Amino acid sequence: MSEGISRRGLLRMLGGGETKQQVPVPDIPAARPPWARDNRSFLALCDRCNRCGDVCPERVIRPLDNSDPVLNGIAVLNLDYGECTFCGKCEEVCPTGALDKELGQQVQAQVRLTGSCDRLLGMPCDMCEESCSEQAIMLAVRSAPEISSDLCTGCGACALACYSRALIMEKRL
């Protein structure tokens, strides 16, 4: 070995340790399934087997259709036509630990009011409040629903119950 390079330095040079740049991890554009780990871990662990989607009784876990090969096929939560009951079957069949009740986060989605609520027009409606088993939605006369983010589980029941589609589900930030 030459005198100016240590053995550790040589191994770093050969392994590319000094010149490696960290690759940016894309953000998943949709809500991850319940008990999903953080974005980086979930992307690294999810092997796109779709077992979680196959076992979901509500059919709300689907593979993402995306042009980015890193994101394409990744499991996401789609609450457009169903609600999540948090049955836990998705976590039970996950072979890689991408979904994990201890290391992941149950709540992955949140509800948002779009501004077209019929109550603001004076119409009687309490469908969202009635559908929320967690009592996260409060209604006052001629006012928009007030949503408690602390109580909301992101299940999607309120958005499904809203016939005017004033409530939508989106990825929790």
Image: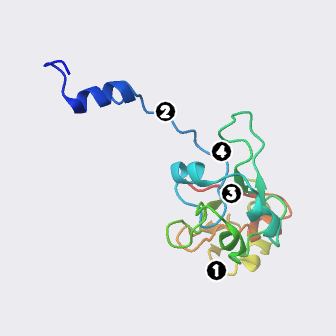
Front: mark 2 or 1: 2
Q: Dot 4 corresponds to which residue?
A: 29
Separation (CA) of disc 4 from disc 3? 19 Å
Label located before the other in sequence (2 or 4): 2
Q: Dot 1 corresponds to which residue?
A: 134
Front: mark 4 or 1: 4
* Residue in view at x 59 percent, y 48 percent: 43
| Label 2 environment density (alpha carbons within 10 Å; few <14, some 14–19, many ≥20) | few
Q: Considering only vertical position in the picture, is 85 above or below 18?
A: below
Give the image quarter of residue 172.
bottom right
* Residue in view at x 64 percent, y 66 percent: 34
Separation (CA) of disc 3 from disc 1? 17 Å
Front residue of 121/65: it is 65
Q: Inspect the image, locate mark 3, and give the three-letter code of the amino acid beneath it.
A: Leu
Q: Inspect the image, locate mark 4, and give the three-letter code of the amino acid beneath it.
A: Pro
| Label 4 environment density (alpha carbons within 10 Å; few <14, some 14–19, many ≥20) | few
Label located before the other in sequence (4 or 1): 4
Separation (CA) of disc 2 from disc 1? 40 Å
Task: Left or right? Give the position of 70 relative to 62.
Answer: left
Label located before the other in sequence (4 or 3): 4
Q: Dot 3 corresponds to which residue?
A: 113
| Label 1 environment density (alpha carbons within 10 Å; few <14, some 14–19, many ≥20) | few
Q: Considering only vertical position in the picture, is 6 above or below 116?
A: above
Label located before the other in sequence (2 or 3): 2
Q: Dot 2 corresponds to which residue?
A: 23
Front: mark 4 or 3: 4
Q: Position of residue 93 (x, y in %)?
A: 70, 70
Q: Position of residue 73 (x, y in %)?
A: 74, 46
State yes or no: discs 4 and 3 in contact (Cβ < 8 Å): no
Front: mark 2 or 4: 2
Instruction: Give me the disc on residue 24.
Output: none
Q: How many marks?
A: 4
